[in-house]
Image (cartoon, helix red, strand yellow):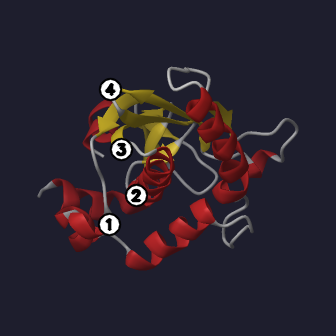
Amino acid sequence: MRHVQASGAPADDDRGPVIEGQAVLFEISDVRWDDDPILRRYGDAAQHALYTRKFTEADIIPPFKYSYGQRLTPQLEWATTLLRSRPYSKSAWVSLTRPGEPYDAVPCLAAVAVRIREGALVMTASFRSQNAYTCYLNYVPLRDVQAGIARDLGLDCGPLRVFVDVPHLYLADLTQVERIARR
């Protein structure tokens, strides 16, 4: 959130005015809903449950226009099989976008990669766009997906690397963002 506030510029969005920050790449060593004091204090448990379903179920759950579970599960099964046979591989990249998709249904999470390095499963997630205020709702279930693959392969969970091309904040959320950022 601070990155977007510091590097951002005003822009428009379908859901209202935003501040768009510069593209960012960062690494998360671990993130869990029940183990993070900031998420416990400021996180939205109902939204967390909804986003978890978005990542784990094949059905499209309103208000979403797509399901990450539907797009990720078969491809990550393929990636797990690949890593089982070639643990050194850099080829376990999967795309979540589909050619000719309706413009309003292009997923924010565009691609995911998994690889084994130093005995741990490393995941990279590439987002075309992401709301910096609610991004945790994607990171927690994505980390759970990573942990599941690591378990399947008998590995520890390594870092979750995240690239966001267009991080942003909605002007309507700035009061809540300021409340959290002060902590």
- Circles 2 and 4, Cβ within 8 Å, touching? The answer is no
How far apart, in angstroms, are the residues tagged by discs 1 and 3?
A: 16 Å
Please tell me which of labels 4 and 3 falls first in the chain: 4
Relative to 154, is 128 above or below? above
* Direction right: furthest residue: 100
How far apart, in angstroms, are the residues tagged by discs 2 and 3?
A: 13 Å
Which circle, 1 or 4, is nearer the viewer? Answer: 4
Give the structural element (helix, strand or loop) at label 2. Answer: helix
Give the structural element (helix, strand or loop) at label 4. Answer: loop
Which is nearer the eye, 15 or 88?
Answer: 88
Which is nearer the eye, 12 or 44?
Answer: 44
Which circle, 2 or 3, is nearer the viewer? Answer: 3
Q: Which residue has dot 3 on it?
A: 157
Q: Is 124 on the left-hand or right-hand side of 30?
A: right
What amino acid is labelled 1 in the image?
Trp
- Circles 1 and 3, Cβ within 8 Å, touching? The answer is no
How far apart, in angstroms, are the residues tagged by discs 4 and 3?
A: 11 Å
Please tell me which of labels 2 and 4 falls first in the chain: 4
Q: Which residue has dot 4 on it?
A: 118
Residue drawn at point x = 39 percent, y = 48 percent: 132
Relative to 147, is 127 above or below? above
How far apart, in angstroms, are the residues tagged by discs 1 and 4?
A: 26 Å
Please tell me which of labels 1 and 4 falls first in the chain: 1
What amino acid is labelled 4 in the image?
Glu
Rendered image quadrant of residue 61? bottom right
What amino acid is labelled 2 in the image?
Val
Please tell me which of labels 1 and 2 falls first in the chain: 1
Q: Which mark is residue 140?
A: 2
How far apart, in angstroms, are the residues tagged by discs 1 and 2?
A: 6 Å
Spot occupied by residue 42 in the image (x, y as percentages of width and height):
26, 69
Q: Which mark is residue 122?
A: none
Q: Which residue has dot 1 on it?
A: 33
